[in-house]
Image: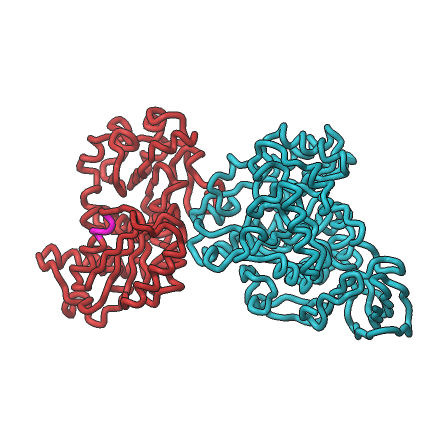
Chain colours: A red, B cyan
Amino acid sequence: MKKHLISAADLSREDALRILDTAEELAQVSERSIKKLPTLRGRTVVNLFFEDSTRTRISFEAAAKRLSADVINFSAKGSSVSKGESLKDTALTLQAMGADAVVIRHGASGAPQNLTQWVSGSVVNAGDGTHEHPTQALLDAFTMRRRLGDLAGRRVAIVGDVLHSRVARSNVLLLHTLGAQVTLVAPPTLLPVAVDAWPCEVSYDLDAVLPKSDVVMMLRVQQERMNAAFFPSAREYSRRYGLDRDRMARIHDDAIVMHPGPMNRGMEIAAEVADSARSTIVEQVANGVTVRMAVLYLLLGGSEPAIGGTL
Amino acid sequence: MSITIKNARILGGDPADIRIENGAVAEIGTGLSGGETVDADGLVALPGLVDLHTHLREPGREDAETVETGTRAAARGGYTAVHAMANTSPVADTAGVVEQVWRLGQEAGHCDVQPVGAVTIGLKGERLAELGAMADSAARVRVFSDDGLCVNDAVLMRRALEYVKAFDGVVAQHAQEPRLTEGAQMNEGEVSGRLGLAGWPAAAEEAIIARDCLLAAHVGSRLHVCHVSTAGSVEIIRWAKSKGWNVTAEVTPHHLLLTDERAETYDPIYKVNPPLRTAEDVSALRAALADGTIDCVATDHAPHPVEDKETEWAAAAMGMIGLETALSVVQETMVDTGLLDWAGVADRMSYRPARIGRLTGHGRAIEAGAPANITLYDPSVRETVDPTAFASRSRNTPYIGMSLPGRVVATFLRGRPTVLEGKIA
Ligand SMILES: [Zn+2]
């Protein structure tokens, strides 16, 4: 594995499978109700969050704590920190504190990459601007694997605001690495101009894609996009690209429905769909902790096995 | 004061001696002598370079550059005249400010500083600045530009183009449709999509250029297009010129060499406006400079202090310095590739920009009677770009660590050396 996890493209197929397999073992351990492992005792993990994301921060924090790491939460949101010179200054502070890993969430694409110049520990991208969110893709792949088995040849539809989605970027890259076939479904305004260069297919027609999908991943669509004319109205968006009960009927019986959260119920996904048995939304949250444990363990190269001698 | 330059290859030709007397070229021949001797064995002699697009940052951002440091950088780059852009603080939108910049240039003495006047008051794009007053001032402004911002209002642009005809001025447009580029971070294309950086589409440049060419033709004015960056812009300018319209254009060295793939590191040293484009754009720009569709090379030298570049991409300032590397980049991209000979370089980096800016004392062939504005250049060396050696106050060069050919050995401004042995004289 590379030292940092900035992009899903940093992971070879072997790396990705190693993370998923490690996460699987960790999940089994925590299902046996051993909540805490000594693996990263004495190591320091800093959560550096420039954007509000309680869910992701808590997930990383729980992951690090279950591995017995010391966790420092550094929330830059709302403080005087707003420009990048502060990113550098903050990084130098963390460096002085001896952070072994820095988990960073930042509103600017590329900020985790910039951070690698200034800290000596591993940098984990917990979401940067409209670039990537690789641990989300890993937890999504983990969730899919638990439900569907091997992902090679599986068909995954990713539906919604691909243009602004770091989740979509990371998922396309990771799922391609794992041999799945991805189809992006969105109105043309919410796709990047050169999306044909991505390792996936593209469709504007959700109804045509649904019947052949094993996984339907709905992306959050912000209503503000409407004001920038990406689509005419929330209602029209919902009608053409929302996953409602009628559309659910077109999905085959074993297919699953995913959402990275937070959801706009009634916009991109109907409440009864989100709450149905096909939905993995709650599992995704639980799996997030396990997958992030695996990532931190493997990046920090814990000298001890993750789980007393079994790995 | 007299100087004899020995064995210089004028525009790359056979070695000849150039005798300089009282600021002018007195004689060209062989076996000349008189006054101090400068050995130019193996060096190419070019007419002093003229930059149509320099940000000297003074007044207002003296932490990034001053007229003194910027003109030292210009001299080291082989320039004898630079056009100082108007986006200073205060903006160069009055006779007072342009005269101040002009005087600072005179006092510095490293090269002539020809101020550019703002088109609109405060670069706000609302009301015309007093263009006539700036033209009539001691600075004798002929080039007007809101550079950094586009004169977006079509009526205002039309009026500006018309108005400057009264004093043979030209409007230099920074072509950027503002709505299409809100929040734009880099060229919109495959790389921007992958990096998740908001795109700056080529069409936002091309749409303004097309409109302005039509306006210039309609009112019979001169239009100059700043920093052309796309293949589509080249096609539009070629079409406008084929109609006989009075349109000129410039390209920067960085757009001749670098592509948007540089952004993959997220190092804001590559963040510039207009952004670095694709390899296809680069080859179209080179071809256009070679065939004269693009008239000249202009640096868009844009100094920024370190802290404005040591940030995440979106927060970083746009722009790169270029005065001290321009000729080397032109050698690398145009001469060593066989697209231009040294006579072509003289045309694109001295004659034509001087003509566009209406500078009568610059951009003249090296011949008896002409002002002795001369650059001696050694094209045979290759050096690694080291910004700590620059005269510029800023260090934001995208070429750091790259190997580039050539070196300016000496620069003469009206017979007086401003650079000798590569150092400020
Ligand atoms: Zn400009």
**Front-most of residues A178 and B407:** B407
**Front-most of residues B349 and B80:** B80
Q: Height in image: B136 above or below A137?
A: above
Asked whether residue A265 appears in the rendered view, the answer is yes
Answer left or right for B43 relative to B56. Answer: right
| Location of residue B126 (image quadrant) | top right
| Location of residue B147 (image quadrant) | top right
Q: Does the magenta portion include A50?
A: no
Residue shown at the point (61%, 54%) measured from the top left: B56
- Quarter holding the N terminus of chain A is bottom left
- Quarter holding the C terminus of chain A is bottom left
Residue shown at the point (85%, 66%) measured from the top left: B20
Q: Does the magenta portion include A56?
A: yes
**Front-most of residues B114 and A227:** B114
The image position of residue A87, as x and y in percent, is: 37, 56
The image position of residue A258, as x and y in percent, is: 26, 41
Q: Main secondary structure of the magenta part?
A: helix
